[in-house]
Image: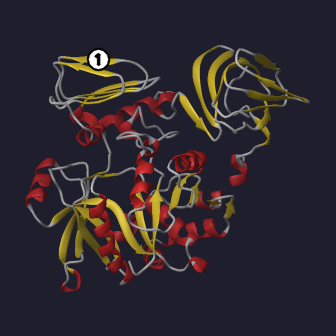
Amino acid sequence: MQSKVRPVVICGGNGSRLWPASRPTYPKQFISLLGDRSLLQATLNRLRHITDEKPMMVANFWHRFLIKHQMEEIGLRDFELVLELEGRNTAPAIALAAFTMRGDKGDPILLVLPSDHFIGDAEALAAAVEKGAELADAGYLVTFGIKPERAETGYGYIKTGAPIGGSSTGLAIERFIEKPNVATAREYVRSPDYLWNSGMFMFRASRYLEELQKFRPDIYAAVEKSVRLGQWDQEAFLCDGASFLETPEDSIDYAVMEKTERAAVIPLSADWTDVGSWQAVWEVLPQDNNGNALQGDAFVLDSTDCLVQSQSRAVALLGVQDLVVVETRDAVLITSRHQAQRVKDMVQLLKDQKRGEATEHRLVHRPWGTYDSLDNGPRFQVKHIVVNPGATLSLQKHHHRAEHWIVVRGTAEVTCDDKSFILTENQSTYIPLGATHRLSNPGKIPLEVIEVQSGTYLGEDDIVRFKDSYGRIPLEKVL
């Protein structure tokens, strides 16, 4: 490519239609839904075949260390991370990336990709990006349209116009179309003039900002201020939280692409799906001779066209068809494949009933490792804590709870007030209420600890941090 292409990966989605596997605290882009790697990791690996430029990820403030851990797993250390305190849809997220790349970083062509899509043909994507770069270099705002394979009602569509400049590189966009009904979608599939809207884009950073300022000056001004008042913290850029929370929500389609006179589309056939429902997951996964896609400890007998995903126990299906069964440690979803788009309605029902399962997993990821809440009741809670080799929890204290730690694997270095000591397997210690304490793993294997909490209040917000190796800062400092 003649022009420098900088990848921008948008990581802010919450994937509510893939509940219970995907939840806001650990959404679908971080989950290994379709293989050994997460969707985000697969996206970054795919980019290595397209450009040598380091990627920039725009992500939720709370997913910072999760992304860093996933990048370490695939050996990607040269990247930039821009953090938004709360999602404001794609138009502001892309503006964050564009503003941070201005000035001494030149004016690169941005290749904007969602972090949670599946693309089976990476070579076809690379060829389409090559064509898109030519149009972006000429000042166009480019999107990629997928040649439809079926009458899909879950996607938006693009009606194409004439070739741009008389070439076959790209097509003008006549109009964008919202998700159609079945009859209309069937008409679109039969016509050569309609493409699925993929949500992937290319343009120069300056061109996007020019069009955003023209059509949505309110978004432009709010994001510009949040970047101007923001700061780099280690490898991440923290935009000014108060300014960014004033930013109106809007998608790039509504804010810019449907209004600009310089929109173009590159047709693309690359075995693409946005992995937006369990139906889409079933379509991508390998299936047995009866059309069943099975993940985990799953068994089927006399059943056809089912998807089963098991995370923690055996799941067996007998004499059924067209079912989706997703089992996690704390929730089970059972639905028809043909109702898979409505899973978000179930999530909303759980939210209305203030159920924690709507947003949080039982297994919680932290910069130092994970914890799993095994049991709880009035005045007690039991957790399984895993601390990665060389990692350490913050130096902290609690106002409302005491803790018992039992080491079941590995070696623990414990600080409790003015004492520091080592615990090995089958040894334990007591952390009194109000004591300043810290847990570290000085070993080379994961440290596993059973923690028993007791007290009048056991919420995660009962933490006063004094020192933290990961630079975690209180929310009020972001604001």
Left or right of 288 in this view: 244: right
Question: Can you say which quadrant of the picture contains the C terminus?
Answer: bottom right
Number of residue marks: 1
Name the foreground residue: 464 vs 387.
387
Question: Can you say which quadrant of the picture contains the N terminus?
Answer: bottom left
Q: As drawn, which residue projects farthest toward the front?
A: 444
Name the foreground residue: 271 vs 205.
271
> Is residue 204 shown above or below 426?
below
- Mark 1 lies on residue: 316
Image position, residue 332 (x, y; %): 38, 23
Q: Is residue 251 visible?
A: no
Residue 326, by quadrant, is top left
Few, some or many residues within 10 Å of mark 1 (<14, 14–19, 20+) = few
> Is residue 341 shown above or below 274?
above
Image position, residue 392 (x, y; %): 72, 37
Name the foreground residue: 412 vs 259.
412
Residue 344, by quadrant, is top left
Left or right of 180 in this view: 434: right
Task: Kindly identify the residue that appears in the image at 25 percent across and 58 percent down.
Answer: 270
Task: Kindly identify the residue that appears in the image at 75 percent across and 16 percent down.
Answer: 427
Name the element at disc 1: strand
Image position, residue 271 (x, y; %): 24, 53
Residue 166, by quadrant, is bottom left
> Is residue 97 shown above or below 136?
above
Image position, residue 263 (x, y; %): 31, 75
Q: Is residue 412 visible?
A: yes
